[in-house]
Amino acid sequence: MRALVTGGAGFIGSNLVDALLARGHDVDVIDDLSSGKESNLTGALEAGARLHTGDIRDGDAMRELIASAKPEAIYHLAAQIDVRVSVADPALDARTNVEATAALLEAGRVNGARRFVFASTGGAIYGETDVMPTPETVEPRPMAPYGTSKFCAEQYLGLYERLHGMSTVALRFGNVYGPRQDVHGEAGVIAIFCGRLRRGEPLRVFGTGEQTRDYIYVGDLVDAIATAGEGDATGAINLGTEEETSVLRVAELLSKHAGSDAELDLQPARLGEIERSVLAADRARELLGWTAATRIDEGLRLTWEASASA
């Protein structure tokens, strides 16, 4: 299968490119390299993947690329992912996450793409809810423009199914972590903690640290994404572990793997962030035959060890 991965030089994208190549697919990658790194794709490029540098907001360039690459499946991971940026500039967030998604859907449709897989978000779409673990049937109530833009983009996927018969699926990720996540990034508390531990700095915790997330190891996640692209399941599908872990627990486990008693630097809570998030994974089991295999302690150990070479 010919596949195109947007954001394919990033943390999740480059791991997905590796997984697709391992499954025997022919892969094109699009990335503007603003946060992704060509070095993440060293092995993939040697194995035959092709990297194209460009911005997904450039509609003309995306149409030309898709017309040339003729992908059967488009895996759309490129996005604006920072909640704080979305609150400060919601229009920028919408241009990147909604407008660019609509343009990619249309470019894929007119060039015969069979399948469109969209990287969405779990906790940021559902917002504050008492239903834990949270299934896809819970009414979305985003607490930030980021979750709102992802949910709006999902509506375009549904539209393209109804209007054009295009096969689409929205995968609602938990909080992803693992090798290649940028320790200097604005998102990804686990990667940031790894960087601070290696520099001997206090672990900065916003709010009480009791807020929870569904942390999913990137190796498990990309298996689900690749499987979704090969299949025909539609609608929204949560990808999570059904395990709720607090930020303080993450700090404790990472400190154990680092052999360090890290000091905590408590900061005020950040606007737009929710207190609890854990995703129900029944639809993923039913439609993709997938279950997350890596428990949080093991995933943190693997991530800590990989951060030594980051």
Image (spheres, helix red, strand yellow):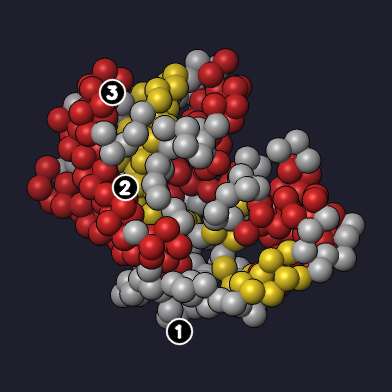
Residue 130, numbered circle: 1
Q: Nearer the viewer, mark 1 or mark 2?
A: 2
Name which of mark 1 and mark 3 comes first in the sequence: 3
Residue 253 location, x and y as percent? 78, 63
Tell me how far mark 2 sits from mark 3, CA to CA: 18 Å
Question: Residue 290 shows which numbered tag?
Answer: none
Helix, strand, or loop for circle 2? Answer: helix
The reply to whether residue 247 is visible in this rendering is yes
Which residue sits at x=71%, y=57%?
A: 193
Residue 6 place in picture, x, y as percent: 39, 35
Marks 2 and 3: which is nearer the front?
A: 2
Q: Along the horizontal axis of the image, is 89 left or right of 220?
A: left
**Quarter of the rendering containing residue 296:** bottom right
- For image coordinates 59% across by 77% down, the residue present is 268
Q: Is residue 65 left or right of residue 301?
A: left
Identity of the residue furthest to the front in this view = 88
Number of marks present in the image shown: 3
Would residue 282 be visible to someone looking at this image? no
Q: Are marks 1 and 2 in contact (CB under 8 Å)?
A: no
Classify mark 3: helix, strand or loop: helix
Q: Nearer the viewer, residue 62 or 202?
A: 202
Q: Residue furthest bottom?
A: 130
For disc 3, the neighbor class at 10 Å (few under 14, some 14 to 19, many from 20) is some
Q: In which quadrant of the rendered view does residue 83 lie?
A: bottom left
Amino acid marked by disc 2: Thr
Check disc 3 and report the residue beneath it: 65
173 versus 103 height, above or below: below
Query: Where's the C terminus, which quadrant?
Result: top right
Residue 96: numbered disc? 2
The location of residue 287, given as percent across then percent down, is 39, 53
